[in-house]
Structures are given as structure tokens and as C-alpha cells.
Amino acid sequence: MSQLNCKLSKTMRTISKISIAVFLLVLPFVVMAHQPKMVEDKNTIQVENPENSQAFYSILDSGPQIYEIKSDTPFVLYINFLAPKIKNATTTKDFSAFIYQRGE
């Protein structure tokens, strides 16, 4: 019986080591999946690698910002505006997006 327990214990240790190794190998790809970027004082922002999830953070108080996306490969475009809800704010701002393809 003790030999069986010893074999099970070795098997469990091996499985644990393999699981940890796989986790450590996959972790960098999960971290790279979302890329936050701070936009500072730029009117036109060049978006690189649009097929990767990216979040652009900025203060929208100085007029429009233009995000240019150039890609030779098709991709799905998701756009989401988030603005803080400020209690007792004296002004509110509306946000909008115009999406077009060159030549259209």
C-alpha cells in the first residue's frame, strides 16, 4: 500500500510541476491581451496592431481626437466610451464617434 501512495504522490508532484510550467508559459500572452495607453496632447493618434485589445485614456476637453487605424488584414472593431459620473456636476458633455473607411 505504501508503494501505491508513493507512486500517487510522485504523479501528483509531476502533474503540479507541469501545471505550473504551463501557467507560467501562458501568462505573458494573457498579460499582453489588453494594452492600456495614455494619450497626451495629441490630436491624431496612430493605432498600431488594431487586432489587439487596446484602451486609450485621455482628457477630452480640447476638441476632437482622431484615431487612425491602418491595417491590411480584416479585423472586428469595438468602440466603447467611458466617462465618469460626477455627482452634482455643473456641466455635462456628450461624446460621439464617426467611423469611416477611406474611399467611402
Image (cartoon, rainbow, N blue to C red):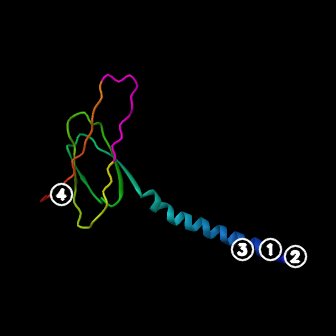
Residue at x 38% of width, y 22% of height: 88
Q: Is residue 21 left or right of residue 85?
A: right
Q: Residue beneath label 1, please?
A: 6
Is the C-beta separation of discs 3 and 4 under 8 Å? no
Disc 3 and disc 2: Cα gap in Å?
15 Å
Q: In the image, what residue type sits under mark 2?
A: Met
Does residue 93 sit above or below 34 in this rendering? above
Does residue 3 sit above or below 57 in this rendering? below
Disc 4 and disc 2: Cα gap in Å?
71 Å
Q: Residue beneath label 2, please?
A: 1
Disc 2 and disc 1: Cα gap in Å?
9 Å
Does dot 2 land on a helix, a strand or a loop?
Answer: loop
Q: Which residues are magenta?
A: 80-90
Does dot 3 land on a helix, a strand or a loop?
Answer: helix
Instruction: Name which quarter of the figure residue 76 lies in.
Output: bottom left
Q: Earlier in the sequence, mark 2 or mark 1?
A: 2
Residue at x 27% of width, y 38% of height: 95
Q: Nearer the viewer, mark 3 or mark 4?
A: 4
Disc 3 and disc 4: Cα gap in Å?
57 Å
Q: Residue beneath label 4, please?
A: 101
Q: Earlier in the sequence, mark 4 or mark 1?
A: 1
Counting from the top left corner in percent of width and height, residue 12 is at 71, 70
**Which label sits on residue 19?**
none
Q: In the image, what residue type sits under mark 1?
A: Cys
Counting from the top left corner in percent of width and height, residue 24 is at 54, 63
Does residue 89 sit above or below 69 in this rendering? above
Is the C-beta separation of discs 3 and 2 under 8 Å? no
Q: Earlier in the sequence, mark 3 or mark 1?
A: 1
